[in-house]
Image: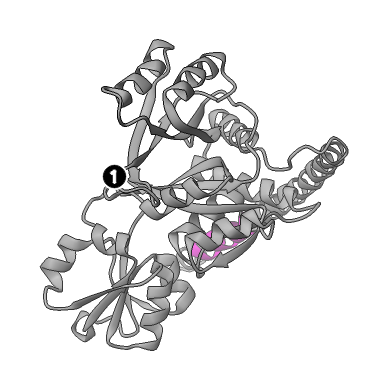
């Protein structure tokens, strides 16, 4: 009997010794990682000095994507690929900030999906600056109060964010990168009880993406639109009768309880964001170019003849949108995405032909395609 009683005790002592040994090995690995991080930081500092002397841009999205892609491809596990991406995103962000953190404007307040897109693209070491509207994001970058801005451009279910398109028509800023963010909406309130909800508050796009769920579960509740999902969360903090459609991150940040999670009508809900800046990045192996143009309306087949120029030069078009011109009734601006960098010879030849067929043509930017 005594031998039976001491069996578990001996096993426990053995486990404790193994845990101590393994933790000591982890500590050694952590110190080695720390040494390598500082070695990497010193190399990055040298690169920063070279870029400063030659007046090169600090932020090159294609290079950062190349680092991430190469490491994921060579990852043998068991560390997950998403973890590799997250860890190296922060390593790159912290390394980049050694000289000066990038100032990144976004549609705020904190915890909007635009904020999350900015964190995904630039990491936590950037200086993320909240702005009250998309127009203020453009203004902050245009006046050099921010190095870059992050703005929503389209949702996979609800289509284009027209206000962003309109602002591009008035701005000389360039698109530097794109960010694709899976969107999941939660219903949040102070109590966490659906019975207490008298009104639902959120951004117009978020309400539209959850409309069927709202009709099924809160058919008699009033809907109110505000400028962002995070502002909706702040509203719910102050009003116990209000529920906000916002992110899980917003619930954590503002101390709200989740009534229901994942209330979006479609599981495959993705929003595309654009990073705007004052200069275009250099070509990468997989670029998109965004254009805007206005056609000569009085010519038969005018739009066809513009698009035919791209087909003749073997250029694939991936998107086309139209928006009414603000200063001329029944005139339209077309927004177009194509697969190539503007420096590509075929693209240059096509644009030379297109320009002759348009009232105006503007390249909004060439930038690496998001994975």
User: Does residue 193 sit above or below 121 in this rendering?
Assistant: below
Q: Residue at x 29, y 65 (%)?
A: 261
**Does residue 321 show up magenta in the picture?**
no
Crowding near the residue tagged with mark 1, few <14, some 14–19, many ≥20 C-alpha atoms within 10 Å: few
User: Does residue 89 sit above or below 315 in this rendering?
Assistant: below
Asked whether 108 or 297 is in front, the reply is 297
Q: Residue at x 17, y 63 (%)?
A: 213
Percent position (x, y) of residue 149? Answer: 57, 53
Number of marks present in the image shown = 1
Which is the main secondary structure of the residues drawn in magenta? helix
Residue under label 1: 330
Percent position (x, y) of residue 225? Answer: 31, 71
**Does residue 13 show up magenta in the picture?**
yes
Q: Residue at x 28, y 45 (%)?
A: 330
The magenta span reads 8-19
Left or right, 183 with respect to 157, comes to right
Left or right, 342 with respect to 300, comes to right
Asked whether 354 or 225 is in front, the reply is 354
């Amino acid at each position: 009997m005594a031998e039976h009683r001491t069996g578990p005790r001996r096993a426990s002592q053995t486990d404790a010794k193994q845990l101590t040994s393994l933790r000591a090995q982890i500590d050694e690995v952590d110190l080695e990682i720390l040494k390598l991080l500082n070695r990497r930081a010193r190399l990055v500092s040298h690169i920063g000095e070279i870029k400063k002397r030659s007046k090169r841009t600090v932020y090159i999205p294609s290079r950062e994507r190349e680092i991430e892609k190469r490491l994921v491809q060579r990852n043998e596990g068991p560390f997950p690929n998403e973890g590799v991406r997250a860890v190296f995103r922060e390593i790159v962000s912290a390394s980049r900030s050694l000289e000066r953190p990038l100032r990144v404007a976004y549609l705020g307040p904190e915890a909007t999906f635009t904020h999350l897109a900015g964190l995904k693209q630039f990491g936590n070491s950037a200086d993320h600056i909240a702005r009250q509207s998309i127009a203020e994001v453009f203004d902050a970058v245009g006046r050099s109060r921010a190095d870059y801005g992050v703005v929503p451009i389209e949702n996979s279910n609800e289509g284009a964010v027209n206000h962003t398109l309109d602002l591009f028509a008035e701005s000389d800023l360039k698109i530097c990168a794109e960010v694709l963010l899976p969107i999941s909406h939660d219903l949040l309130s102070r109590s966490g009880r659906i019975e207490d909800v008298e009104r639902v508050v959120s951004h117009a796009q978020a309400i539209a993406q959850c409309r069927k769920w709202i009709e099924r579960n809160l058919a008699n509740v009033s809907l109110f639109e505000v400028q962002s999902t995070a502002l909706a969360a702040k509203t719910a903090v102050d009003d116990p009768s209000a529920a906000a459609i916002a992110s899980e991150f917003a619930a954590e940040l503002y101390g709200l309880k989740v009534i229901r999670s994942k209330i979006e009508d479609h599981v495959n809900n993705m929003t595309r964001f654009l990073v705007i800046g004052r200069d275009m990045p250099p070509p990468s192996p997989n670029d998109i170019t965004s254009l805007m143009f206005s056609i000569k309306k009085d010519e038969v087949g005018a739009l066809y003849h513009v698009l035919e120029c791209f087909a003749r030069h073997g250029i694939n078009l991936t998107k086309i949108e139209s928006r009414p011109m603000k200063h001329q009734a029944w005139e339209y601006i077309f927004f177009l995405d194509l697969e190539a960098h503007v420096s590509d010879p075929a693209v240059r030849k096509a644009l030379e032909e297109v320009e002759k067929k348009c009232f105006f043509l503007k390249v909004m930017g060439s930038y690496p395609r998001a994975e």
